[in-house]
Amino acid sequence: MGWTTTSEYDRFFKGLFTIKEYLDREMASDHPDHPRFEILDSSLHGNSEYYAAVRRTDRKTGDVVVFGMVVLVSYKPKDPDGHTLGWKEVTECMGPYCFKCPERILALLDETDNDHALEWRQKCREQRSVASTSRAAFQNGAVVRFKNPLRFAHDVERQQFTVEKHGRKLRFRAEDGVLCRIPKAATMAFEVVQRAA
């Protein structure tokens, strides 16, 4: 499956709907010849990952199932072709590789025996747990030690850092005094050497 792109978001809907609201409308379907799809709850992480609990109702049998969907999103307001918004849908049964789905959405999903869906749900919960632990640990002044040394420019390895908050930004000061930016620090294994005062 490829990407769907549109020029209509910026031309007609920007200002009326957020990207999340627009995708809520796009992912829902009520065509009389096909199953009905309803968005029960959704979340947009950044402008790159949309998560939804989708209720599918089979019009012939009346069977109803609620499943998880991930939609990869690309918003490029200055796209030269005018196709500013693009998306690619992936159901949980396809084994998506995005794991930031909120627990409130996971809680709405029906039980499943699909291995890909079960693995995806578990990884979402694990990432949420790690992120929650990291937020609590990465307080201004805390000292943390990553399980594996991190490699920086000129092959310099550093492992222990003092956490510094600069506004909303998180930075890590190494033992040698260098201030470092560590993307995805919250997903790495670490231990707290000294809690923040």
Image (cartoon, rainbow, N blue to C red):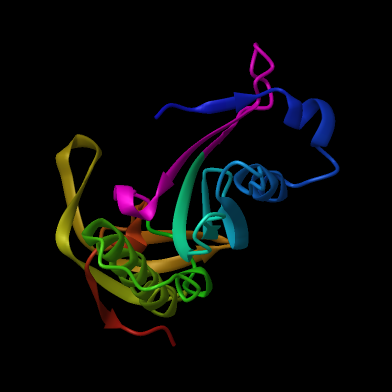
In magenta segment, residue 93:
yes
User: Along the line of sight, which residue is nearer the eye, 145 or 185?
Assistant: 185
Answer above or below: position of 123 versus 140: above
Answer above or below: position of 71 versus 113: above
Q: Where is residue 84 shown, x and y percent of the image?
A: 65, 25
In magenta segment, residue 30:
no
**In the displayed image of the protein, which residue is found farthest to the front?**
60
Answer above or below: position of 134 versus 157: below
Q: Where is residue 14 shown, x and y percent of the image?
A: 80, 37
143 with respect to 48 (left or right)? left
Answer above or below: position of 41 versus 194: above
Residue drawn at (25%, 67%) of the image:
113
Q: Where is residue 121 shown, x and y percent of the image?
A: 34, 66
Q: Quadrant of residue 184?
A: bottom left
Which part of the image, by quadrant, shows the N terminus?
top left
Q: Which residues are magenta?
A: 73-98
Q: Where is residue 182 shown, x and y percent of the image?
A: 35, 53
Residue drawn at (57%, 49%) of the image:
46
Taking the image as drawn, is residue 40 in sight? yes
**In the displayed image of the protein, which residue is found farthest to the top?**
81
Residue drawn at (52%, 43%) of the image:
48
86 with respect to 113 (left or right)? right
